[in-house]
Image (spheres, coloured by chain):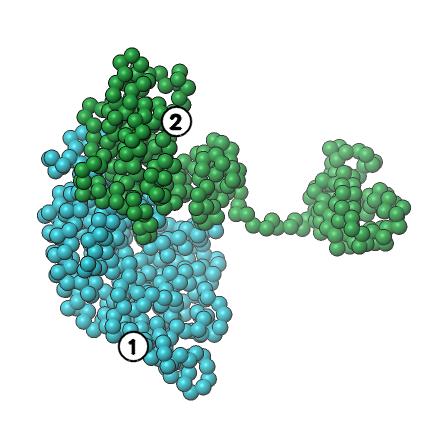
Chain colours: A cyan, B green
Amino acid sequence: MRIVYVDNNATTRIAPEVYQAMVPFLTGDYFNPSSMYEPAQATKKAVDGARREIARHFGNVDPSEILFTSCATESNNTAIQGTAKANPSRRHVITTAVEHPAVLEVCRELKRSGYDVTFLGIDGDGNLDVSEFIRALRPDTLMVTVMHANNETGVVFPIEQLARLTKETDPSIVFHTDATQSVGKIPIDLAGEYRHVDLLSFSGHKLHAPKGVGALFVRKGTPCRAFMVGGHQEDGRRAGTENVPYIVGLAKALSLCMENHQEEEARIRRLRNRLEKALMERIPYIQVNCRNAPRLPNTSNVSCHYIEGESMLFELSREGICASSGSACTTGSLEPSHVLLALKVPFTAVHGSIRFSLGRYNTEADVDRILEVFPEVVASLRVISPYWDEKTNSPVSDVEERLGKHH
Amino acid sequence: MGWEYSEKTKQLFMDAVQGKPGTHLGEVENPDGLGEHGSIACGDALRFTFRVERNDEDPTQDVIVEARYLTFGCTSAIASSEALCAIIERGRYTPIEALKVKNSDIVEYLDGLPKQKIHCSVMGAEALESAVFNWAQRRGVDLESLGVALHTGGEDEGRIVCKCFSLSEPYLRHKIQELNLRTIPEITGAIKAGGACMSCHHVPGGLQDLLNEVWGEGPKTLPLLTTTPPPVAGLGPPGVSPEEPAGVLSPYQFAKKIEKTMDQYVRPLLQKDGGDVEIVDIKGNLVYCALKGTCAGCAHANQTLKMMVERTLKEMVDEHIRVIEV
């Protein structure tokens, strides 16, 4: 069966060019970059080259401001916990209610250990309220950590604006952004528009590099202590032997993303828009979440009323379509995604969400295949649903009563 | 999270989705029993209906002959609903007998369910119970007088802490207080929370955190040793209990009193057996002692210190004293 992979916000296929770039360092050039002998110098050069290449894509920042880590989760932990450790006198953190768990849980952990944390909400379109953000800044605010693009809905927050507001209010406040979903999709100039961002996290496997490598941008002079302590690698800011092949792969992957960025973005946006338009036409009681907010071009999050996401995924999977859902049964907990809850998606639809996230290797044929399968899946599950009347193809006439019994 | 469903579970789900003949998908018209459990907001909901063959003389002898379901939920919720109906029809149970069908029977019928999906089978059992209750009302059967106990499960919304049994933070908080639950095993025993995969015990926001929050305790870390002596009773003749009007002793007086008590009551006893005890240091209420003579290296040394020295000091000087062997 042909696999239609539309879960690129979860992970991506390794680009063949990336794999090729990594091979020498998985085979012959295995030396430890910290070693003194001649062959090791080549691996050190490869790491330095990757660092320069990545720095270049962020607006020619100083290469020493790029730290390599194992993943975005590690980058986020380093950024948040490292900043907290370096500034014990400030005890207030600002974040949002829709962060990835790699930020949200770290903030909750700070809160449990006595920090005051402000979790900013979003409106029904998925946007932050900037005036609420400004109100949240306090004299004892240690840091702000706000994601760039949301992994579930694709909504892009105005990081450049929030960072500037933060720094103009109080230059001591550290500004961090988790840019895992946006790096490679949105150009980020850390020397220009985004110059007020102090810390920026991302990982490789969202941009066609392998899993197990990430990076953290740390602007010079940012008070942030090491999270991984040990050897002197990365100037003592991140201990542990450099993962040379993966670091090389990460740099290659980012370069590939940036090379054809404009055409790719337009192509993927067209695919996504076509998909959404057709789904809206063919499926009753469907909504596209956050469609009025600025969004990543590749992400489409739809909610189907009166059916549940996990069973939709199961049926899609049987047809070879790989997507994801924010429904309770797929989040690993039993509540639906915190993002959909924060969006106040109606409770009849909050469990019925499906996220299609397109990528470099998706084609028109993939969209055709989804359009062939998905409306059928929705219809067959609605037959089973106690809230749907097959005959009229609409909710049962006493749906309010049936729903109301438990509310 | 991948799908770890049994073949049987997948098959039942697919049969239902494809509307194969023989499935129990649907709704009995003018049912004799209707039960619902769950809600769309909670992520799964089951509408369960059955029809009975009526026994006009004795309604308790009605036999369930047809069972149907409509389900909003995941793969295993739909398969569990199908299993429930199949079990009920196969058994030709009276409604009261049907109550003996438990969620474990559904799990068995499905050749097992992933741990975190057990609640799907619970939903089946709960909907069945509520349908039987509904039947009893329609048929004028007094379940209580027949000794049939029905409990109506309270569903609370909120962050799910115990995933295996689908128990939310507000529900757990409420039960911890209501039932005065103080430890994780107590919670598990009373309301099953944390009893299956146990992953919610010590994670951030887990059962231990809830216990700490409800009972106002900090995280369980090593207590700090007090370095200042606690208030102690004033000097008095031996045998006078510390409940007597007490003043606060200075560290000097506190130490002196300990020494005096040791000299007067403890050492003479030990010396009789050729032993002795020496005070090495006193920090707050901690008295560091070294045993001497025959007591040193004696197998009962620790016993001696705890039972005799500490008890005497607690009684004569201050009940907070702890003796530590050097």
Q: Position of residue B80 (x, y in %)?
A: 30, 38
The amino acid at mark 2 is His
Residue A172: tell me if it is visible.
no
> Residue A55 location in percent, x, y?
31, 74
Residue at 11% across / 51% down in the picture?
A278
Which secondary structure lies at badge 2? loop
Q: Please say if A153 is above or below B185.
A: below
Q: Chain of mark 2?
A: B
Numbered-mark total: 2
Residue shown at 33%/60% (left/top)?
A: A178
Badge 1 amino acid: Ala
Residue A353 lies, in percent from the top left, at 23, 47
**Viewed as shown, does residue A274 lie left or right of B247?**
left
For residue B226, say whether it is visible: yes
| B134 lies left or right of B163 | left
Q: Which secondary structure lies at badge 1? A: helix
Counting other residues with Cα less than 10 Å from the Cα at mark 2, is it few (<14), some (14-19), or many (20 or more)? few
Please tell me if label 1 and label 2 are on a single chain. no
The residue labelled by disc 1 is: A21
- Identify residue for label 2: B151
Give the alpha-carbon distance from disc 1 to disc 2, as whole Å: 64 Å
Q: Nearer the viewer, residue B97 or B309?
A: B97
**Of B26 and A62, which appears nearest the observer?**
B26
